[in-house]
Image (cartoon, coloured by chain):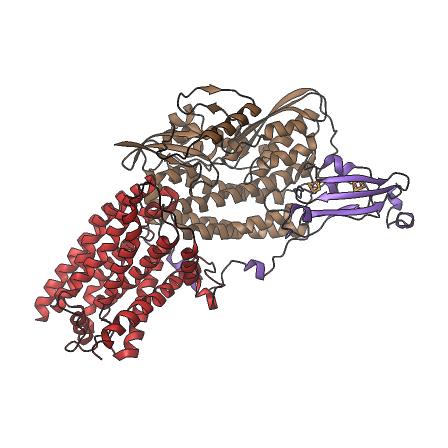
Amino acid sequence: MAILKPLLYIFVYPGVIFLFVYSTFCEWFDRKVYARLQNRMGPTHTGRWGILQPVADFIKLLAKEDIVPERADKTLFTLLPVVGIAAVSTAMMLLPVWHYNVANSSPNSFSGDIIVLLYILTLPTLVFFLAAWSSTSFFSTIGGARVLTMLFGYEVPLFLAVLSPAIMAGSWRLAEIAAFYQHKPLLLLPNIIGFVVSVICLQAKLERTPFDIPHAETEIVGGTFTEYSGKKLALFRLMTDVEMVAGSGLIAAVFLGGFPGGVILGFVNFVVKTLLIIFLLTLIRALTSRIRIDQVISFSWKYLAPLAVLQLLITIVLKGFVR
Amino acid sequence: MRIAAFLPEILRHLFKKPATVDYPFQKLEVPKDFRGTPFLHPELCIVCRACVRDCPAEAIDILTVNEADKKFKMVIHNDRCIHCAQCVESCPTAPKALEMDHLFEIAAFSRWDLKKEWEYVKAQVKPKAAAGTPSAEAKS
Amino acid sequence: MKFTVPIGPQHPALKEPISLRMTLEGEVIRDADIRLGYNHRGLEKLAEEKTWLQNIYVTERICGICSHSHATCYTQGVEKLMEIEPPKRGIYLRFLVAELERVHSHLLWLGVAGHEAGFDTFFMYTWRDREVVMDILEMVSGNRVHYAINTLGGVRRDIDDLQKKKILDSLDFLRRRSEFYFKIGANEPSFVARIAGVGRLSKEDALALCAVGPTARASDISQDVRKDDPYGMYAEVPFEVATATSCDVLGRVVVRVKELMQSYNIIEFLLKNLPDGPVAVRAPRRAKPNEVVSRYEAPRGENIHYIKSNGTDKPERLKVRAPTLANYPATVVMLRNGFIADIPLIFAAIDPCICCAERAVVLVDGRSGEEKIVLMSELRKQAHERWKKAPLKKDAVWPF
Ligand code: SF4
Ligand code: SF4
């Protein structure tokens, strides 16, 4: 029994199987909603309502020719997709999806896991940068430089915004933060600024419009992924999907009161809340056009960072009153 | 400047039917004067070769099968045809021996599959008023 | 650190092959070099092999988007050579299609601008509504892209009252939608941030570099062949030349939207005042030896055809100056000191039609920069030899 639980955790929920199924579903959801917002059909013909399209794309990419550029750093080039997907899957493990009971929870919930989670979610960015750098093409290099530049823009506001609910809850443990807000749901309201900031930062982290600058197709071809093909590209795409699930899971856990209510209700909670956040992300994607890299930096330091600091101030002041 | 100026419009369309036509499953309507591919009414052609002369793509060939029997063969190479309908316009008979149909799905695996052929006997040149119906001699 | 990035001949932002070599310093463009010649089709030579009538269809295929512009420009010129005058109704219908084409081209361009800026929703919506114009064009002419409505001495098809009513009804919808897109384009902060102040071309530069069409008009040069040298019935149609003073990509958007509005008015005027009568007169098959220059305001700018006849049924020479070609020198100036991210937008803002502008191929030695003329057979032999000798290149450098 003691072994079964971690196994279940790693392989079924929220581990590998669930992650694959759910992240492809989320990609489908994102694409379908995006298409509908544009009055298009979106994926239609693979499975009912095209629901299997992301899986089909994944399998198709797996079967494609896999090219490694001659001048690329071959080990790094090959290894990075695996590292990336491992990192985001690990991040997913830390989400408090099983912890209905704070006192009696699994070993991978510990004090400070929110920090670890944020840290692990930074790894994909690094992976993108290294991937771009190791493929040594012009467009990749520019893409890689843009990845790093953007990182300096959104990372600080994201940290500030995500940490302020934690300060309010007085804990560095996701399960406890979620539990705190389940007891006092009204306290979620003052966090609204932080919520908005972190959704925008997540959008930037996922490199979606308006922040799809590192792989802006019309400017620098595929950017980071210019040289990637076949299996490696498939893994990178899956990685972005998983990152989207993990990121929205984090925001849901911190800002929307976690996923309470036992196995089934908790699961439903998880799906509904993450889908809500993914819907918001899709809406941002449909609403905006890509901005320039210098505009990202000035936007995040002019607006996002001050807003995140304001959120922090509100939290601290409020905490004095609540006490 | 307004943030999210597009929002009402795109939300309104979220639950609307998509504007896309699900094309190969749902056929497209073309207007009645659509220029599809040219085809021949063999009983009307007087072999004046006006169509051959004016076709900008050199897509029409008229071959003589048998000079004595006045037997001819017209070949339209649809792989070369640019669907301009100049041949129809140049054709002097009334009603026109050449016409355009509404076909636009004419893709084929080989360019030879796109060739259309008619073998026929040359029709009598008639004064315009009399050429209301296909003449009897032409058919024999 | 300066380095050169090749944009094209194959690049997702370019729909047709052209090579833009950008000298970059970080993300900033220091210099640009435009190289043509990847899409040369020899259309001018081909035109010398075809009769006057067949050439309408050849010139129509110079460009896909402004097919009617080239065909009309050519037809106008040939009609002058043949000394025939198309009937009034024919003229009205010809320029009805011309204005419809302008509408479709500008709507297409709006969408492309959105797409190049990563604003795909804008792109999808404009193109959805562009279908309305495309359907009208298909209904009027029988095809969506190559309308083939011109003939020597008029047009080939008439329109009936039902079609007339349908077009007038659609105009309302199109007006409303164009206004809406303009509002979106001018209000969405992320989009405006991308186009305002980008790709500046001062009035002096625009004049000096002979920019044409919306590119020139966005730099506050009121230049429009329809007004300056009216052809067809434009002298009797009331309309204004749309200009903008901001000299950037935003200005080019503004000019095009204003022109859309003008085009709707012109279409309405043409339909309401459509004269009765025949649509075409018979044209002779030959033209007396002479030469003519025909000017036409295409959606992208001034289009010039020079036609020379020698008394036969074929032209002696046809020379096409497509508007895109005139805008290339200005593009280089616009690109300078911009960001990499602006390349697709600035380049798209001249609404380039690359294959229109392909006129000649020059052989330039990659390393010495020397130009030379060789026979085709010689060229093939060289290519063959080179291919046989060429080893697999390990450290290939781009020849500058
Ligand atoms: S439609 Fe045009 S290209 Fe086709 S056969 Fe007739 S004249 Fe030739
Ligand atoms: S099809 Fe018409 S134009 Fe062609 S040869 Fe026959 S009669 Fe003449």
Chain A: its colour in the image is red
Q: Residue at x 33, y 50 (%)?
A: A212
In-front residue for pair C328/A52: A52
Q: Residue at x 37, y 36 (%)?
A: C248
Chain C: its colour in the image is brown
Q: Whole-percent x and y of residue A228?
A: 36, 49
Evaluate whether residue C395 shows in this view. yes
Q: Is residue A5 left or right of residue C219?
A: left
Quarter location, residue A287: bottom left
Q: Whole-percent x and y of residue B64?
A: 83, 39
Quarter location, residue A73: top left
Q: Is residue C256 left or right of residue C277?
A: left
Q: Quadrant of ligand 2?
A: top right
C62 w.r.t. A169: above or below = above
In-front residue for pair A115/A179: A115
Q: Whole-percent x and y of residue A250?
A: 24, 64
C387 w.r.t. C112: above or below = above
Q: Is residue C366 left or right of residue A295?
A: right
Q: Is residue B75 left or right of residue C393?
A: right
Q: Which chain is purple?
A: B
